[in-house]
Image: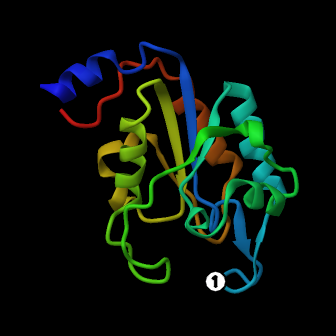
Amino acid sequence: MFLRRFCKYRGALNDTKIIFLDFDGVIRLSQNGFGSVGYQFDYSKIRMVRELAEEFGASVVVTSTWREMYDLPRIITEMRGGLEHHHFHSSWMTPILSATSRCRERAVPRGVEVLTWLYSHPEVTQFVIFDDLPERGFQSILDHFINCDHVEGLTKGNIAQAREILARAHPAFCPIV
């Protein structure tokens, strides 16, 4: 009963759009094309995220494992001004629900962390998720999920998909029926 009531009023407060953003394999790419060695931020990809956020008045929420190691000021510094503090939501990261380290398989799928964040933010009317992880962790929110190729990272095609998602009319969001 609570969930139905909660979902009925979701989005009634404000028109808030969110970009859930993974880093490695999306905006931070391996310089040798594979593996986890030599990852660096690709500023052209960060610029695409910034432009998307500004176009839709969307805020960024970090889903990357970087949120486990670094605070927001450090992340912004690493991005060298590609995204600034005002581009991020005041609750700038999804909750860390997995008890395992970032080097082991995740006990809690990232999609569950996204859903948990969304349940805490009823003002959200539309959102998009950029991630290079397989979609199996995002089943209930698949129509908001854009799977980036981990070698190529974020593409103009991915951004076009995100524009379509963020421009949709927004019925009250409720992933659980």
Q: Residue sitting at 42 percent across and 48 percent down?
A: 114
Give me the residue at 27% from left, 17% from top. Answer: 8
Q: Residue furthest left?
A: 1
Q: Residue 85, percent across and down?
A: 76, 42
User: Measured from the top left, where is residue 30 in percent x and y?
Assistant: 71, 77
Residue 152 sits in quarter: bottom right
Q: Give the left or right position of residue 117, taking residue 8 as reference.
A: right
Regarding residue 40, the answer to whether it shows in the image is: yes
Instruction: Pick the quarter of the image with the N terminus.
Output: top left
- Does residue 97 lie above or below 113 as drawn? below
Q: Is residue 151 above or below residue 12?
A: below
Report if residue 161 is visible in the image.
no
Q: Seen from this angle, which residue lies furthest right?
A: 80
Query: Circle 1 — which element?
Result: loop
* Tally of numbered tags: 1
Kindly identify the residue that appears in the image at 81 percent across and 63 percent down.
Answer: 78
Question: Where is residue 34 shown, x and y percent of the image?
Answer: 64, 83
Image quadrant in which you'd find residue 48: top right
Q: Amino acid at mark 1?
A: Ser
Q: Residue at coordinates 32% horizontally, 71% vertically from top-left? A: 107
Q: Is residue 164 left or right of residue 95?
A: right
Furthest residue in direction top, as rendered: 12
Residue 95, placed above or below residue 39: above
Return the x and y of residue 27 as percentages of the image width and height: 70, 60
Camera-side residue of 83 and 171? 83
Q: Looking at the figure, which quarter contains the C terminus?
A: top left
Say which of 164 and 74 sits in front: 74
> What colour scheme governs how the chains and residues are painted in the rendered image of this protein?
rainbow
Q: State the residue position of label 1.
A: 36
